[in-house]
Amino acid sequence: MLIVMDQKANPQDIAAVIKAIEARGYTARPIPGGERVAIGILNNEGPVDAALFLALPGVKDAIPVTRAYKLVSREFKPEDTVIKVGDVCIGSGGLTIIAGPCAIESEAQALTIAGHVKRSGAQLFWGGAFKPRTSPYSFQGLGQEGLKILARVREKTGMPVVTEVMDFETFELVEQYADVIQIGTRNMQNFSLLKRAGRATKPILLKRGMAATIDEWLMAAEYILEGGNSNVILCERGVRTFVHHSRNTLDLSAVPVVRKESHLPIIVDPSHAAGRRDQVIPLSRASVAVGAHGLMVEVHHDPAKALSDGGQSLYPDQFEMMCRHVRSIYHILQNRKDDK
Ligand code: PEP
Ligand code: MN
């Protein structure tokens, strides 16, 4: 249930509602909004009696929340969440482009690619230091050395950096270096990692599990918000189907569904969805057309020599073209906002 306070409610009214919620053994979660405060009731088993709260001073409404996820839902927070990373705002009102190589291979490689993607308009740099690989014989990433290189890229280019955390043990280390911490598809339901992410001081980019429903994905995000970290960016990256023409199938319908159900920003990773370079640009255009708040794209200056995912990495000039195309599409949508 969500208790909506009147605009004129004072801090004592809010405190009294929180006390009344806690007195019944529930958890109260105040959610400051633009106009007025709402207080979410969590940890209730079974329905909550609205009458208990409607009688209290300053209470405007008590709305039952019908979804299993609470804090991530629009029922709890109607306004879009915008996440600030350095000077970049991720969410409604802008298009954020995150780009870089699948894996950090060397400082020279990372700086070369960072220079290219920055010139084309990427706002955040992406690169993996700890890589989840299907084969134990594949390149596993440079680990801490990769994180240090990411820090140098940030220093030299001014771009905030996004990188993946693979396990609980290395979380603190990754948190020290990253501006945004990615939880990849294979870890979407790693609940101890999600709980740790809830205590993190950095925003979390939560990719959709490759076989996860949207409800399961939003419940995974709920773990992070419930733990106290409300800065979560969702990332659709394709789901596994029976097809052979792409590595996964990009579920574009997830974008409008998530935007309807949740206030969290949603971006799309067309690179891991496609698994092939020739599909990345069309899928990027489609993602923006369908309402994504941003894109995350793999780019490499010499994909033939890349140590991972070279086959799906765009060449810098292709990335530059992609940026131009998606920005044009985004501007058309912005200018047509009123005739929905
Ligand atoms: C990645 O971003 O490099 C990655 C491994 O992505 P995903 O978790 O979506 O497969
Ligand atoms: Mn990759």
Image (spheres, grey):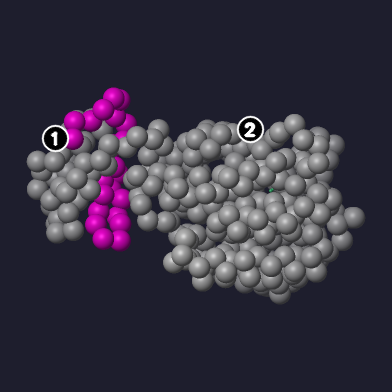
User: Label 2 is placed on what type of residue?
Assistant: Ala
* Disc 1 element: helix
Identity of the residue furthest to the front in this view: 339
Q: Which mark is residue 211?
A: 2
Residue positioned 20% across, 37% down in the render: 21
Residue 203 x, y percent position in the rendering: 51, 53
Determine the image quadrant of residue 156: bottom right
Q: Residue at x 60, y 59 (%)?
A: 289
Q: Nearer the viewer, residue 322 or 91?
A: 322
Q: Is residue 313 above or below residue 115?
A: above
Regarding residue 182, the answer to whether it shows in the image is no
Q: What's under tag 1, amino acid-wise?
A: Ala
Question: Which residues lie in the magenta part?
Answer: 27-51
Residue 33 lies in magenta, yes or no? yes
Q: Residues within 10 Å of mark 1 (few under 14, many from 20)?
A: few
In the picture of the structure, the residue carrying the numbered disc 1 is 51
